[in-house]
Image (spheres, rainbow, N blue to C red):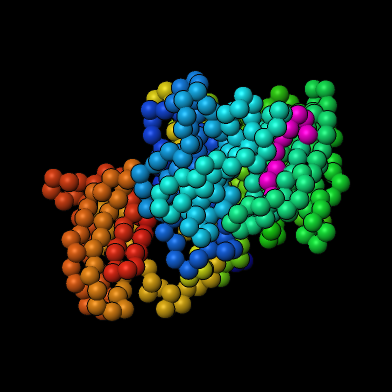
């Protein structure tokens, strides 16, 4: 009998170890001399091209009390950040990436601005030649249009306007021609909408209390359902609706005031619906929850599903980012671990490729350090299937990754070509260059000497870029 108990105990440990996931060490992805907030990363795991060389991030950068700019960065190459919108005395806020890589356009970015004296919604196009189109008005009225929301794989945008929740249908992809009239989904002191590709939800203020409603979109009728109330009383805010159309992806989370503390509550909007057991630390404020569900996985060394939760808690005395330490388990650890400041607004996003079928899941948040807000990030690669031999030949293998010391890189060449490469830091600085050289077909290998005399490499996130004639391979790796 004791042997059976021992076997079960060892099996449980093995399963827990198997479920642990390899997030990369967190790194800052914005500067530390201005305030950077409201980050958005293009999210789409269904329609990516076979080769990706861009994962764009946009965010707000406050230059002074009168101006707010919108900046952009390519996370795939860790390219240098650059401004998309900037004008003295004008606020450009709440950017969301509405479309990526269509024709000659790299990005469509929706945003809010007070350019005309009140808050209006516009979009711009960032083109492949590096130019930026003139702003195009989406909603330009005497009222304030705020709290803009957008969901990729869905034909429309959502916002708040004078206590109403308003939806505007748009055609996809490309031109964003209007295909229908605006629809008012809710009226009467309604605020802070959220949406994904099937649902939207919002808060409704009734006196000192906050109700929570949601509506479901029918693709067959192209109409929203009547509002459904899921929370009738109490103080509730900071809604977060996961972006997924795969069970159990349609999860709505929020924070609720109970017993003098903020706690996390949730509701599964799909597949019959129902309340989700709350998770939090007792006698602490637990706020700003976010949820991500990763699709099926058949890679032999990983479990079938990935369910990620994150939230902010002051259980350590400061606001810190907590995340479940094992997939699918409500066992939370301090991920930001920054006791001398504040870490807020965690959120998940993802982007993917076809070959091999995989996605990268991003966790971003805002961290207050040295008197300014920075955006920090971690990510992990999530495979949707077992890559075949042919697809494995199309990329770079880096090991060990993460590494405390040197790193070995391997790649394959189909035919003789000129090869060159670079190692780039998270700040966009080139720290190693490999001179062009003619290489024969077959497996190639090179080593990164971290402690090369006179140019030692500090801990952080890096990108290895290999140029193979008319092809470019990229691989992120971490040194610690």
Residue 319 within the magenta-colored segment of the rendering: no
The spot of residue 106 in percent (x, y) is: 48, 54
322 lies left or right of 392: right
* Viewer can see residue 287: yes
Q: Residue at x 68, y 61 (%)?
A: 246
> Is 213 in front, or is 54?
54
Residue, far top: 65
Q: Residue at x 55, y 67 (%)?
A: 384
Residue, far front: 134
* Viewer can see residue 43: no
Q: Residue at x 59, y 49 (%)?
A: 98
273 lies left or right of 93: right
The spot of residue 474 in percent (x, y) is: 36, 60
Q: Which residues are magenta?
A: 156-164
**386 lies above or below 424:** below
**237 lies above or below 449:** above
Q: Provide the major secondary structure of the magenta segment.
A: strand
191 lies left or right of 463: right
The spot of residue 100 in percent (x, y) is: 53, 55
> Is 104 in front, or is 45?
104
The spot of residue 57 in percent (x, y) is: 48, 46
Residue, far left: 453
**58 lies above or below 446:** above
Report how many numbered discs are placed on residues in the image. Answer: 0
Residue 238 occupies quadrant: top right
The N terminus lies in which quarter of the figure?
A: bottom right
60 lies left or right of 442: right
């Amino acid at each position: 009998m004791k042997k059976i108990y021992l076997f079960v105990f060892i099996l449980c440990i093995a399963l827990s170890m198997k479920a642990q996931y390899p997030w990369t060490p967190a790194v800052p992805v914005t500067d530390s001399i201005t305030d950077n907030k409201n980050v958005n990363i293009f999210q789409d795991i269904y329609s990516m091209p076979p080769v990706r060389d861009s994962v764009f991030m946009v965010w707000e950068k406050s230059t002074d009390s009168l101006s707010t700019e919108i900046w952009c960065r390519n996370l795939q190459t860790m390219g240098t950040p650059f401004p998309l919108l900037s004008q003295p005395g004008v606020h450009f806020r709440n950017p969301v990436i509405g479309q990526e890589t269509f024709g000659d356009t790299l990005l469509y970015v929706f945003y809010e601005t007070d350019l005309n004296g009140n808050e209006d919604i516009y979009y711009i196009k960032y083109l492949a030649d590096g130019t930026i189109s003139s702003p195009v008005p989406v909603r330009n009225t005497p009222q304030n249009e705020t709290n803009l929301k957008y969901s990729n794989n869905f034909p429309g945008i959502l916002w708040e306007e004078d206590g109403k929740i308003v939806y505007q249908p748009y055609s996809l992809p490309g031109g964003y021609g209007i295909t229908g009239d605006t629809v008012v989904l809710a009226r009467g002191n309604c605020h802070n909408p959220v949406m994904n590709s099937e649902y939207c939800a919002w808060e409704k203020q009734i006196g000192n209390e906050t109700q929570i409603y949601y509506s479901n979109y029918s693709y067959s009728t192209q109409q929203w359902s009547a509002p459904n109330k899921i929370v009738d009383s109490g103080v509730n805010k900071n809604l977060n609706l996961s972006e997924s159309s795969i069970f159990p992806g349609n999860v709505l989370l929020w924070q609720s005031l109970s017993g003098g503390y903020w706690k996390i509550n949730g509701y599964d909007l799909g597949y019959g619906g129902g309340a989700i057991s709350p998770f939090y630390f007792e006698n602490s404020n637990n706020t700003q929850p976010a949820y991500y569900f990763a699709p099926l996985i058949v890679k032999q060394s990983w479990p079938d599903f990935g369910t990620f939760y994150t939230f902010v808690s002051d259980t350590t005395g400061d606001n810190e980012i907590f995340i479940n330490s094992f997939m699918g388990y409500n066992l939370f650890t301090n991920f930001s671990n920054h006791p001398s400041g504040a870490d807020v607004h965690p959120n998940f996003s993802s982007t993917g490729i076809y070959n091999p079928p995989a996605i990268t899941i991003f966790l971003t948040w805002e961290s207050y350090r040295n008197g300014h807000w920075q955006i920090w990030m971690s990510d992990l690669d999530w495979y949707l299937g077992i890559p075949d031999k042919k697809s494995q030949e199309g990329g770079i293998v880096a090991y060990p990754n993460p590494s405390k010391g040197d790193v070995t890189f391997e790649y394959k060449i189909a035919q003789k070509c000129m090869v060159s490469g670079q190692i780039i830091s998270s700040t966009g600085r080139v720290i190693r260059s490999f001179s062009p050289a003619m290489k024969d077909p077959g497996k190639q290998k090179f080593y990164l000497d971290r402690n090369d005399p006179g140019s030692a490499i500090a801990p952080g996130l890096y990108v290895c870029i290999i140029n193979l004639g008319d092809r470019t391979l990229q691989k992120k790796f971490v040194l610690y």
